[in-house]
Amino acid sequence: MTHYKAWIILICATCLFSCNQKKKNNQQSADVQKEEFIKDTLPRTSITFILGHDKSGYNQYYTLAGHYYRLNEEDKTEIIIDNITALSEVCRYIKEHPPANNRPYGLINLVCHGNEFIDMGVLVTPHGVRASAESIEKAIHDSVFIPIDTNCMDTNTWIYLHGCAIGNNQALLNALSVAFGSKQNGVKVKASKLFEYYAYLSRNKNPQSIRHYFAKAWYAFYHPDSLVGQQYFIRQFTKRYPHEQIQWEEGLNRRFQSNPGEIYHFSFFVPVVWDELYDDEALIPMLNTKDRKKEWLMNNKSLLNLIQQTQIPLNYFQFKYYKQKYRQESQEVYVLRVKAKTGVICLIQPLLSENDSLKSLLVPFFPDENDSLYFRFSYNELISGKHPEIKDKKLFTIK
């Protein structure tokens, strides 16, 4: 009988210990959840990267953007970085500078020039090539981008890319998502389909009066070697946009705005660079005549496909061919570099507030931040169901 009592006492003691341990574990779990909840209620840090410097006093895009994100009450961020001009260095900075409150960044603004046709006006790496979907994908394949810890970025972090209608380039947003995240878990990236710029509202150019404008843009193209006048562009605009009621001549006559509500224009070049690699210099084709250059180009389907991505007709491009040589590890590599570029005239019409009483004050129009009519989102945000436009498409394939 005593033997059985001993077993009963042992079982009761074991059960009591198990219950106490369970309570202890539950308490620890509750404490962790409470700590995480408190941590989750802390505000997230926002940061802006100004990824370039103005080359003239006429177009102060980067300068005005820097003032805006420092001083504007609604959109200013806690941190402004203006000495980085490569995406790989942005990635490195984020990894090496986690927010002080141990919460991942909430908003990461990337401000740069660029074009919706093919690339951004920022380099992938210092002294490297411009950032396009293809060059970013190659950098991912070459392990250029450093994996970022979840204490710096997580699924609730937004990367907001500010540029010239870069939101029309879905592949570029997808590539950025993977570059700052991973193939399995890309981060959330968004960009406007509209043109963006910053302008003073006050005549005395008070930095605190700078506002962020969205604008519609229309494009006409020209061959860099051609001499064309205003009527050439008016005819092209009219043909390309037959249903638009735009004063093309007014926009072409105005290079700089006297106020942020005026239609105006600016010009730029769209560059496309292609490298063909050879093991032997003797293998580089002789392209010393116009016919040979044309034949080589027409047979290079990959380069033609790249140019086709710009959606600009081939006849507007100027092509130049160069022979180069560099050392790759212990081997000399010979390169046929092809530089193609086309001239672009861009007419810009700012969007003002839809409230008629505010239009005379030149108050900018702000679309809803989730409106897919004005913004495009990286694939990982689309598959969440919030933006289902291309739910069935793959992010992209690393070759």
Image (cartoon, helix red, strand yellow):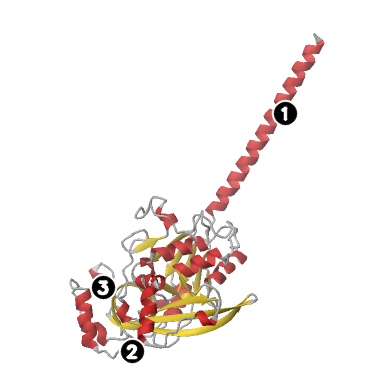
Local SS, label 1:
helix
Residue name at image x 26 percent, y 89 percent:
228
User: Mark 2 touching mark 1, by CB under 8 A?
Assistant: no
Residue 259 visible in image: no
Task: Give the x, y percent position of residue 311.
Answer: 32, 71
Q: Residue furthest top?
A: 1
Q: Secondary structure at mark 2?
A: loop
Choose the circle earlier in sequence order: 3 or 2. Answer: 2
Residue depth check, mark 1 versus mark 3: number of the one nearer the observer:
1
Q: Which residue is mark 1?
A: 17
| Circle 3 Cα neighbour tier, 10 Å, few/some/many (<14 / 14–19 / ≥20) | some
Residue bearing mark 3: 359
Residue 12: x and y in percent read 72, 21
Looking at the image, residue 64 lies above or below residue 42: below
First-in-chain label (2 vs 1): 1
Give the amino acid type for the residue marked by disc 3 in the picture: Lys
Percent across and percent down for residue 392 are: 38, 51
Give the quarter of the figure containing the N terminus: top right
Q: Nearer the viewer, residue 174 or 253?
A: 174
Q: Which numbered disc, 3 or 2, marks the residue closer to the eye?
A: 2
Q: Quadrant of residue 170?
A: bottom left
- Residue 161 sits above or below residue 313 on the image: above
Label disc, if present, on residue 225 of the rendered structure? 2
Of 179 and 19, nearer the camera is 179
Question: From the viewer's perspective, is the residue at label 2 or at label 1 nearer?
Answer: 2
Q: Amino acid at mark 2?
A: Asp
Side of 252 where 290 appears, left or right = right
Element at badge 3? helix
The amino acid pointed to by label 1 is Phe
